[in-house]
Image (spheres, rainbow, N blue to C red):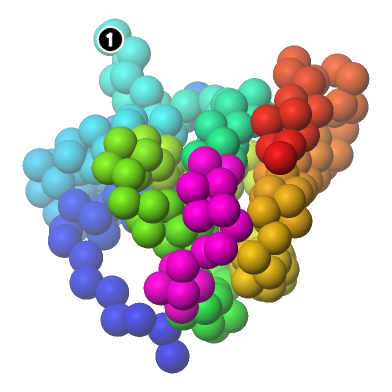
Amino acid sequence: MGEIKYRTLRESVVDAIREKIISHELEPGMRIIEQEISEEFGVSRGPIREAFRQLEQEGLVEYTRNMGCSVKEITLEDVFEAYLLRGTYELIAVKSFNGIIPDSALKEMKRILRLMETMNEDSFNDIITYDNLFHGAMIKETGMPRLIKAWNDLDYATILSCSVETQDSKTLAGWQYKVHSKLYDVYRSNDTTAICEVIADHYMNSIKRRLDSSNVSESDFKFPLDILETLFAR
């Protein structure tokens, strides 16, 4: 059984709209009209405005003068940049521990893995939440407030990644559990080089898989993927 989740009205509205965007019920460029969302969800327009502001911060919607709010076009370049930063922060954490990940972080990762295994396969929001919690467990244990803040500011990386995902939530949920189980096993190795390599593979493979599904070759991609290998070298 998963965790019982408590949501404010604003959080519930954010989750509902985000799910519509990531599942492509709302396509890039489509306008999102406050009144229509208010009527659909049966809530006042105040929480809708608050939800729009958060979704704008996450990079999923944008405001255009005289047009209002619309779904933003997310590119693979956006995802790559967010993943590049996110992966670098994880590398800093690993090296700050000399490859010996604290037991408290490993315990939290194990807990999240159990939730991943039984999560709602119809919900992209669950996939995003558990992914962020799993990776964030190690960052929080560094005790570096600026690193932790920088990491939290990048929570939207998983959201951007899901927004360009071509697989359905059920397929992605199964993949998430397997890949994070592999990460967890290597994190327990106390081997800095092995951990850095698996982190690099984790992010590079995510980008490569999306390039393949979009029929984009690595040579045509704007950024060199080997930059990750360079940054993640011991």
Quarter location, residue 228: top right
Residue sitting at 46 percent across and 58 percent down? Answer: 138
Give percent across and percent down for residue 220: 86, 18
Q: Find out whether residue 102 is within the magenta segment.
A: yes
Query: Which region shows up in magenta?
Result: 90-107
Q: Is residue 44 above or below residue 181?
A: above
Give percent across and percent down for residue 163: 56, 42
Quarter location, residue 31: top left
Left or right position of 81 against 125: right
Q: Find out whether residue 202 is within the magenta segment.
A: no
The residue pinned by badge 1 equals 66
Nearest the viewer among 192 and 195 is 192
Give percent across and percent down for residue 112: 48, 74
Left or right position of 163 against 200: left
Q: Amino acid under label 1?
A: Asn
Give percent across and percent down for residue 50: 17, 40
Q: Is residue 129 visible?
A: no
Residue sitting at 53 percent across and 32 percent down? Answer: 85
- Image quadrant in which the N terminus is located: bottom left
Residue sitting at 50 percent across and 55 percent down? Answer: 97
- Image quadrant in which the C terminus is located: top right
Nearest the viewer among 100 and 30 is 100
Left or right position of 93 against 84: left
Q: Is residue 156 above or below residue 14?
A: above
Residue sitting at 10 percent across and 42 percent down? Answer: 46
Q: Is residue 101 visible?
A: yes
Q: Main secondary structure of the magenta part?
A: helix
Nearest the viewer among 130 and 190 is 190
Nearest the viewer among 23 and 116 is 116
Q: Is residue 26 above or below residue 199?
A: above
